Image (spheres, rainbow, N blue to C red):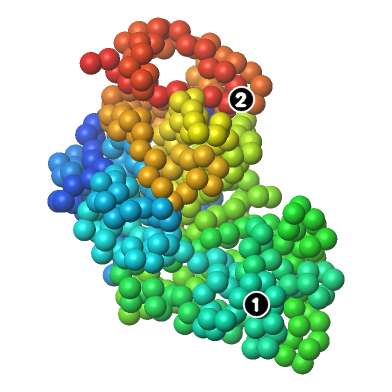
Amino acid sequence: MHFFLRKTNLFLFCIYLSLLIIMSGCGTAGPSPTTLAAPTPVPWGEKSIKVTPTPGPCTQAVCLNPSTMPGVRPFIDTWNNIHIFQTFDFYYKSYQIAKYGKTFDMVWGAGQEQSYTPALWRATNPNIFLPYYIALNRDSGTVADPGIGGLAGRINYWKAVHPDWVLYQCDRSTPVTQFGNPNIALDISNPAVQDWQMQTYMQPVSQSGYDAIGIDNVNMNLPGGEGGDTQKMACGHYDKNGQWVQRYSGQTNDTQWRTDVLAWLTTMQKRVHALPHPLALVINLGMAPLTGSDPFLQQIANHVDGILDESGFTGYGNQYVTDDAWVQLVQFIKSVQAHNKPYFIIDEFKYAPGQGITNDQVQWALSTYLMGKYHLSAVNPVAIQDYGSPRPRDEYNAPIGVPVSEMYQNQYVYWRNYSNGLVLVNPSSSSSFTVTLDSPHYTDLYGKAVGQTLTLQPQSGIVLLNKK
């Protein structure tokens, strides 16, 4: 799927002409949505991915992309301007939901504060999309027995009730845990585990007004390795007769694990679609050790209804995505949307305590997002793991307009033209480039005039607006 845009000039020219016809688009909030015609899917693996443009200008405050799943709420169309979503609602107060709810396209993990029901969010934003959070392969802390307790209690519980469900490390005695949580990893290849997940989570959620199941930690690397100790990776489980079943290699890059994940998604997508109140399946996809051009990720995307990318363009706040990997990620984001599936980007940033994320960090998040944004993409720039609280910024309201070109490479950096501005990204990990703009009449997101030449440092981006 990986290709360089500079090699597809004819394709870009055709797209450019098509997009010029639709210079106005959809807003971010409002009470009267219009549903757009569904885009034509493109087969996975096709090198020239073409995203169907909006069929005519949207004159309503909110536009909706029709869902491909009968009975599932459509996603808000993101063609116009910048679209933001919220990750969790841990620390929200009801008045904050009323104040900020209309600014979000989605709340991933809505209802983490138990009193905040979907109805509370929809009282402010009737079109907001609300996935309910569960983990892919952990018990997630909500099993029937209220006395299950911490790690020791959970181990004893599962050993007593379903000992063949527990996933163990390679020492064959220590249950797999993840991220410092006491939750126990379960064997998702076991149909009985899948049935339990349906009964415990999916069915109740479908009756509670949610739109989707948000599956966390759908990681392509093998679970385990607490504290960076690779000796603690998942290896296998015991069968009902107490015999050891070696299922995984204990190495991070494990093909059988990825095969099991794909099989689980394929099964669960069908099952949640078939519920009396159908649900979408939206996953938090951890790509590593794969990259955006890997065909296996295309198979994963075929069996979900939307992707949340917590790694985003910042590698979970550890290291920016740069060079060819950056281009591949933009193309993957684009290809997912081409199949009428939304792509939600979390960009986590390191920050100085008490100061929040910086303007340069916000510029990186917004510029990279706008390179791959079409009708179904939103972004959430945050400090590392700073989830669950409102963090509004004026930059998110920038009137950049609608895309009037595909992303293209010029003067060693990447550009994308919008109806009311211009976006540039230098994804190089090591080189700075000075570029000449097509006009001296731009300002940055903070109202500062920008001259006709501009230097972009390594791994940096900027969003420019036309002067009023």
Identify which residue is drawn at 16% across, 51% down. Answer: 31
Q: Which residue is mark 1?
A: 154
Identify which residue is drawn at 52% across, 12% down. Answer: 455
Q: Is residue 188 above or below residue 2?
A: below
Would you call the spot at circle 2 few (<14 residues within 10 Å), some (14-19), or many (20 or more)?
Answer: many
Q: Nearer the viewer, residue 158 or 327?
A: 158
Q: Residue furthest bottom?
A: 241
Which labelled disc corresponds to residue 428?
2
Label 1 secondary element: helix
Q: Nearer the viewer, residue 228 or 153?
A: 153
Identify which residue is drawn at 15% across, 41% down. Answer: 59
Q: Looking at the picture, which amino acid does disc 1 mark? A: Arg
Quadrant of the frame with the C terminus: top left
Asked whether residue 51 appears in the rendered view, the answer is no
Q: Which is nearer the N-term, disc 2 or disc 1?
A: 1
Image depth: mark 2 or mark 1 in front:
1
Percent x, y of residue 433: 56, 14
Q: Is residue 97 above or below residue 312?
A: below
Q: Looking at the picture, which amino acid does disc 2 mark? A: Ser
Percent x, y of residue 49: 45, 43
Q: Nearer the viewer, residue 293 or 222?
A: 222
Identify which residue is drawn at 36% across, 22% down. Answer: 445
Percent x, y of residue 294: 62, 49
Asked whether residue 446 appears in the rendered view, the answer is yes
